[in-house]
Image: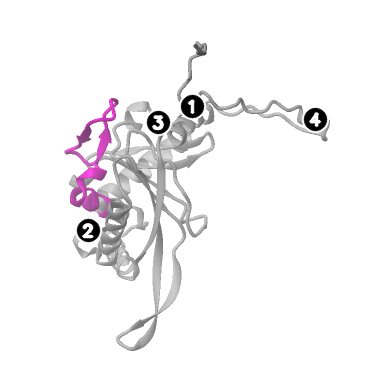
Amino acid sequence: MTAQSTTPVLPWPANLPAMPTIDFSQFGAVETLDLSRNQLYAGAFLGRNWAQIPHVTHHDEACIDELHRHRRLLAEQLGRKLTPLPFLIKALVNALQAFPQFNASLAPNGKQLVLKQYFHIGVAVETPQGLLVPVIRDADQKSIAELADELADKARRARDKGLPIGEMSGGCMTISSLGSIGGTAFTPIINAPELAILGITSEFERLVMVDGQVQVRHFLPLSLSYDHRVINGADAARFCRYLAAQLADPAHLV
């Protein structure tokens, strides 16, 4: 009878080989810098989320010429500058209402889906200490102007002195926007226990045919990462198409 090993088999990724430890100074001059407390905290959770959630990213784009027009009109009425982000939040809320499986979390036992009846949207903010994600609560009940005010306030406080954990908890889905910096697409990491995250990159121009005439249209790239244990590719494609339609016809968002 063959003897069996009594060594326990650890679940992935604990049974992977350890990362290499290297003295880089043997190759040349180096400098060692300490990561910030926020970077250490966020890095641990991002590593866990990437390792334990089967990520898939779906890429799409939305025509935003009408969005820009409505944004400028509303900015003139309010007498203030408006970014596209409040409109994106409104469009995302509408998409979550139309596709409730996205506005949910997987129960710890992995056998149940917790459907949420509220709509809290996280927005990733770059700070000197690293990324923070303020949460806009009850975004479905707030106007574009109210969303813009709350976003500006939370972004300013996040950059100045950080935010309490209560203002960064309870999100249903997160928006990570790189549009002011650049890029064409990326793969944002899901902010567990959320099931998806929406990435935004820089808008671009394209020549398109409209009623037999060549016209210039502006498009916004959308990168949707989703948890494939709950959401399949067809769900993600329909979600992005619905979201793009909301942004292309924004009159109902105002």
Report the magenta residues as a range: 91-119
Circles 1, 2 touching at the beta carbon (< 8 Å):
no
- The answer to which quarter of the image holds residue 117 is top left
Q: Which residue is mark 4?
A: 25
Q: Which residue is mark 2?
A: 253
- The CA distance from mark 4 to mark 2 is 56 Å
Decide if residue 230 is on the left or right side of residue 49: left
Decide if residue 118 is on the left or right side of residue 181: left
Within 10 Å of the Cα at label 3, are there few (<14), some (14-19), or many (20+) other Cα atoms?
Answer: some
- The CA distance from mark 1 to mark 3 is 14 Å
Residue found 67% across the figure and 29% down from its top:
33
Residue 254 seen in this snapshot: no
- Where does residue 10 sit, x and y in percent of width and height? 48, 20
Q: Nearer the viewer, residue 143 or 115?
A: 115
Q: Which residue is mark 3?
A: 163
Q: Amino acid at mark 3?
A: Leu
Up-down relation of residue 200 to residue 112 (above or below): below
- The CA distance from mark 1 to mark 4 is 27 Å
User: Is residue 108 a member of the stretch shown in magenta?
Assistant: yes
- The CA distance from mark 1 to mark 2 is 36 Å
First-in-chain label (1 vs 4): 4
- The answer to which quarter of the image holds residue 229 is top left
- Where does residue 87 sit, x and y in percent of width and height? 29, 56
Name the mark nearer the viewer: 1 or 3. 1
Name the mark nearer the viewer: 3 or 4. 4
- Where does residue 181 sit, x and y in percent of width and height? 52, 55
| Image quadrant where one finds the C terminus | bottom left
Residue 250 seen in this snapshot: yes
- Kindly state the secondary structure of the residue where label 4 is placed: helix
Q: Which residue is mark 1?
A: 41
